[in-house]
Image (tube, rainbow, N blue to C red):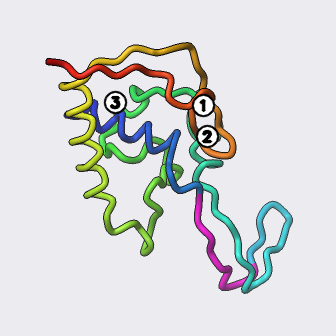
Amino acid sequence: MPFTQCVINETLRVANIISGVFRRTVTDVNIKGYTIPKGWKVFASFRAVHLDHDHFKDARTFNPWRWKDNNLGTSCSGNFYTPFGGGPRLCPGYELARVEISVFLHHLVTQFSWVPAEEDKLVFFPTTRTQKRFPINLQRRR
């Protein structure tokens, strides 16, 4: 199910449930001429990076094919794809989450059909969602 993994990667990039994490600086940090003093808390925004056009072409477009030719399967553009965090604080359940999403998608695609109930568009603030909420009609296949 390689393409399913592409869909999962893109879903996590565009609509990650975690918008970011707080971290405390352990030393003074200089970023673009600004100094963040030691001990201050900073918010690392996953959403801001995942939706940044400098890191992902057409960043606000859902495009699972962007992951198709990626050999790693989880990194589209360097260290800019971090739906489960990274380093020593990488989510310990990230592989289980991917399996659960894969099983859900398998059942959704094989047991249901759906049609758009009406035209809608994505809204990216404060969270990624459809503007009219749930604009699809599901029907169980028999």
Towards the viewer: 103 or 14 = 103
Q: Is residue 15 above or below residue 132?
A: below
Residue picked out by circle 3: 68
Identify the amino acid type marked 3.
Answer: Lys
Give me the disc on residue 60. Answer: 1
Mark in front: 3 vs 2 = 2
Instruction: Judge left or right: residue 31 versus residue 100.
Output: right
Q: Are marks 2 and 1 in contact (CB under 8 Å)?
A: yes
Give me the disc on residue 51. Answer: 2
Rendered location of residue 101, percent (x, y): 29, 45
Rendered location of residue 55, percent (x, y): 59, 41
| Circle 3 Cα neighbour tier, 10 Å, few/some/many (<14 / 14–19 / ≥20) | some
Q: Is residue 25 magenta?
A: yes
Q: Residue at x 27, y 30 (%)?
A: 3
Give me the disc on residue 27. Answer: none
Instruction: Judge left or right: residue 69 versus residue 117.
Output: left
Residues in magenta, as a range? 20-28
Identify the amino acid type marked 2.
Answer: Leu
Nearest to N terminus: mark 3 or mark 1 = 1
